[in-house]
Amino acid sequence: MHAARPRLRWGVHARDAGIVLAAILASGTGDASPGAAARVGLREPRVAARGPARPLARPPKPPAPPKVAWASALPAISVKNRNTNAQAKIRLYADDGTIDRDALCAFMRVAASAPDPSSQEIAEPLDARLVQLAFRAAYHFKGAPMVLVSATRKGAHGKHGTGDALDFQLVGVRAAALAAYARSFPRAGVGIYTHPKTQYIHLDVREQSFHWLDGSPPGVTWRERRLADRTQPKRDAAYARVLDLPEVASK
């Protein structure tokens, strides 16, 4: 009968166990007990101890955008929808001079014809440049509160249907003065509604400026008249994005 093969009784890697077993068998002792390896001149193989797992290093935070003085100094503007009474204080620009997207969305929610404060979706979006121009006007008139009359209207034709138009007033500012200032904007449409029950301006964004006045009562349009605009070609050709920002940005 064949002699029983010795069995290893301590845990080692298979390759190292084979080496130890071969040495023991070659010695003729048949002893496979712990310590036998040492008696034939071999060290018992050891499994390297593993320390605690090192946590993965977090990537460094990107540096914060540098602040710009004009943006940091801007106050929030009070905005109210006169039809729904939705309102908020909105600071459109972050400290680095870029548009604060949360603030822009907040403005759109106030401007909506049927605002839903619980919804994060913007059902009636507005062009960002249009909102910038409205804020430019508010800052020009010393941070005057803004009253929104009409913005995006579902199913409407023209600029109000595409989110490119806004009808609004500034508290304490005559509509004529607001319209006169807005007509300095390049690539913008500006209409002034002069009826005693209106007294607000229409502002929209477009490629070629267009100005008009309308003395019609609320809800109708039948006294619209185009205003002459001799500086339109030169003004529109000189358009630059800085002209959408508050005036203090270019000082």
Image: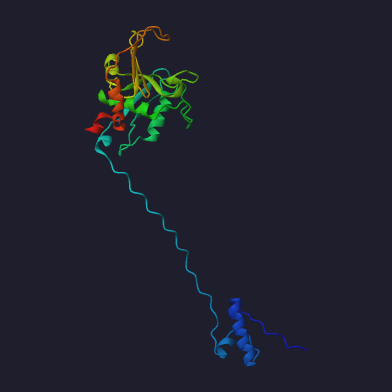
The N terminus lies in quadrant: bottom right
Q: Does 65 sit above or below residue 110?
A: below
Residue in front for this viewpoint, 89 or 180:
180
Left or right: 222 as drawn, with respect to 36 = left
> x, y percentage for residue 91?
33, 31
> x, y percentage for residue 67?
28, 41
Name of the residue lying farthest toward the bottom:
28
Left or right: 168 as drawn, with respect to 38 = left
> x, y percentage for residue 51?
47, 68
**Residue ID at (28%, 24%):** 235
**Residue ID at (63%, 91%):** 26
> x, y percentage for residue 243?
29, 29
The C terminus lies in quadrant: top left
Residue in front for this viewpoint, 8 or 156:
156
Residue in front for this viewpoint, 39 or 98:
98
Q: Does 74 sit above or below residue 36?
A: above
Left or right: 122 as drawn, with respect to 31 = left
Q: Quadrant of residue 100?
A: top left
Name of the residue lying farthest toward the right:
1
Residue 137 can be seen, yes or no: no
**Color encoding of the figure:** rainbow
The mark tally for this picture is 0
Residue 3 can be seen, yes or no: yes
**Residue ID at (32%, 44%):** 65
Q: Quadrant of residue 103?
A: top left
